[in-house]
Image (cartoon, rainbow, N blue to C red):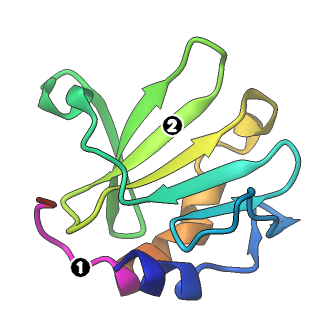
Amino acid sequence: MCGNLDKALPSEVDGTGRRDPAPASALTAGWGDPAIILRCGVPRPAEMDDEEADGVEVDGVGWLLQKRQDGSFRFTTTLRKAYVEVSIPEGRTGDGMAPLVDVAPAVKKAIPAGIAD
């Protein structure tokens, strides 16, 4: 699933070109500087068990929203067969959910709805 996602990801997110982190992997992608980082196949966040956790839906993809101590945001897909995480650094959070709008179509195409093992 993650390999299919890597092939489906856009070349641009939030107006910046793709610049994958090293080492190269089908499990990671990045855009811009400071980089928005996508990781596929991450473990299920413990916060998903919290009924008070913040969640959003963007273009048919559900995301757990976690604001981090350093001012960055981490979004992790919900109700998909693999967990996909998108980290947005503090300097790039001003556009809100724009990065998720850009990656949601690829997630919907490559990662089927359901519960990850």
Q: Residues within 10 Å of mark 1 (few under 14, many from 20)?
A: some
Above or below — where is 65 with respect to 3?
Answer: above
Whether residue 7 sits left or right of residue 80 in the image: it is right
**Residue sitting at x 75%, y 57%:** 22
Above or below — where is 64 with respect to 112?
Answer: above
Q: Secondary structure at mark 1?
A: loop
- The numbered disc on residue 74 is 2
Q: Is residue 20 magenta?
A: no
- The numbered disc on residue 17 is none
Q: Quadrant of the C terminus?
A: bottom left
2 and 1 marks in contact (CB < 8 Å): no
Amino acid type shown at disc 2: Arg
Q: Position of residue 116 (x, y in %)?
A: 16, 61
Q: Which residues are magenta?
A: 110-115
Q: Position of residue 85 (x, y in %)?
A: 45, 50
Which badge, 2 or 1, is on the more N-terminal residue? 2
Amino acid type shown at disc 1: Pro
Q: Quadrant of the N terminus?
A: bottom left
**Residue sitting at x 42%, y 69%:** 59
Name the residue at the top extreme: 69
**Residue sitting at x 27%, y 64%:** 82
The quadrant holding residue 16 is bottom right
Q: Secondary structure at mark 2?
A: strand
Q: Nearer the viewer, residue 64 or 22?
A: 22
Magenta span: chief secondary structure: loop
Q: Which residue is labeled 1 in the image?
A: 112
Whether residue 53 sits left or right of residue 85 in the image: it is left
The quadrant holding residue 84 is bottom left
